[in-house]
Image: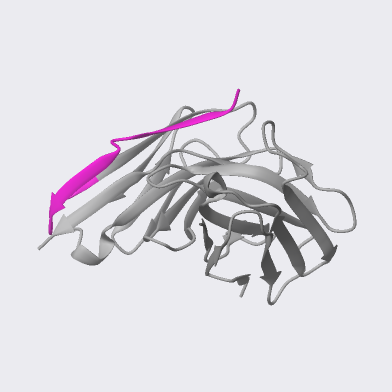
Amino acid sequence: EDQVTQSPEALRLQEGESSSLNCSYTVSGLRGLFWYRQDPGKGPEFLFTLYSAGEEKEKERLKATLTKKESFLHITAPKPEDSATYLCAVQAGTALIFGKGTTLSVSS
Amino acid sequence: GAVVSQHPSRVICKSGTSVKIECRSLDFQATTMFWYRQFPKKSLMLMATSNEGSKATYEQGVEKDKFLINHASLTLSTLTVTSAHPEDSSFYICSARTGMAYGYTFGSGTRLTVV
C-alpha cells in the first residue's frame, strides 16, 4: 500500500534558525514526489516536484532533496512568513497521496 | 498559468439539503480532476477522480450516491453533496493535472458547514 509519513508533526523555530522536514514514503514505482505549502483555510500551493533519487531543487529559502526512501525539505534562515503547513505527496496512479503535513511556526 | 478556480469558498447549509461545489480550470483543459476532503489538522484524503465525459472513480469508503461528481466539460467538474448532514462538514478541495512542470494545481477549497 502506498504510504507517506511526515515528521515532525509540528515544528517551532526562531527566525533565522535553519531546520529540515522529513517525508518518508513507500510506493510501488515512484512517479513523482511533491511538496506543497498550505496556509490555513487555503488550498495547497505548489513548491517542488522531484522524480529521481539524488535530485535537488531550490526556491528562495527552501531546498528539497530526494532519496529512494525519503525526501527532506530544508529551510534555511526562515522568516515568520514561512509559517505554514508543509505537505508531502507521492503520485500513486494518477492521483496524489498526501502525508499529514508538518506545521511550521517561525517566530521573530 | 495553470489556475484552478473553486467556488464557493464557504457555504452553510441546513441538514438534508444539497450543495454543489464547482471547480474550473481557467487557462488549460483538464481531462482529469480530483476531489479531496480535509478534516481539521488532518491530511488531504482523496475522495474521487473525475474524468471528462465518463463516470467518476470513487475511493473505497466514499459514498457515490452522497457525493455526486460531474465532469461534463474539459474545464469544469462539480461535486454535489446530497442530503447533507453535520458529519459532512469539512474542507473540500479540487485539483487538476496540468501536464506542466508543477503537475497538479489545487483550488482554494470550500469550507462546508452543515447545521
Q: Residue furthest top?
A: A1
Q: Which residue is drawn at 89% across and 52% down?
A: B54
Left-right relation of A57 to B76: left
Examine the rendering and report whether any part of residue A33 can be seen: no
Is residue A11 one of those drawn in magenta? yes
Left-right relation of B80 to A43: right
The N terminus of chain B appears in which quarter of the rendering? bottom right
Placement of B7 over or under A18, stated as above or below: below
- Residue nearest the viewer, comparing A88 with B66: B66
Q: Which residue is drawn at 30% across and 38% down?
A: A9
Q: Residue at x 77, y 54 (%)?
A: B69
- Residue nearest the viewer, comparing B78 with A26: B78
Placement of B10 over or under B40, stated as above or below: below
Placement of B19 over or under A66, stated as above or below: below
- Would you identify the image quadrant in which residue A36 lies? bottom left
Examine the rendering and report whether any part of residue A99 can be seen: yes
**Count of residue discs:** 0
For the record, the magenta segment spans A1-19
Q: Where is residue B14 in the image (x, y as percent from the top left)?
A: 58, 60
Left-right relation of B94 to A49: right
Q: Position of residue B101 (x, y in %)?
A: 60, 60
Q: Which residue is drawn at 61% across and 43% down?
A: B46
Placement of B82 over or under A102, stated as above or below: below
Q: Where is residue A92 in the image (x, y as percent from the top left)?
A: 65, 36
Q: Residue furthest right?
A: B53
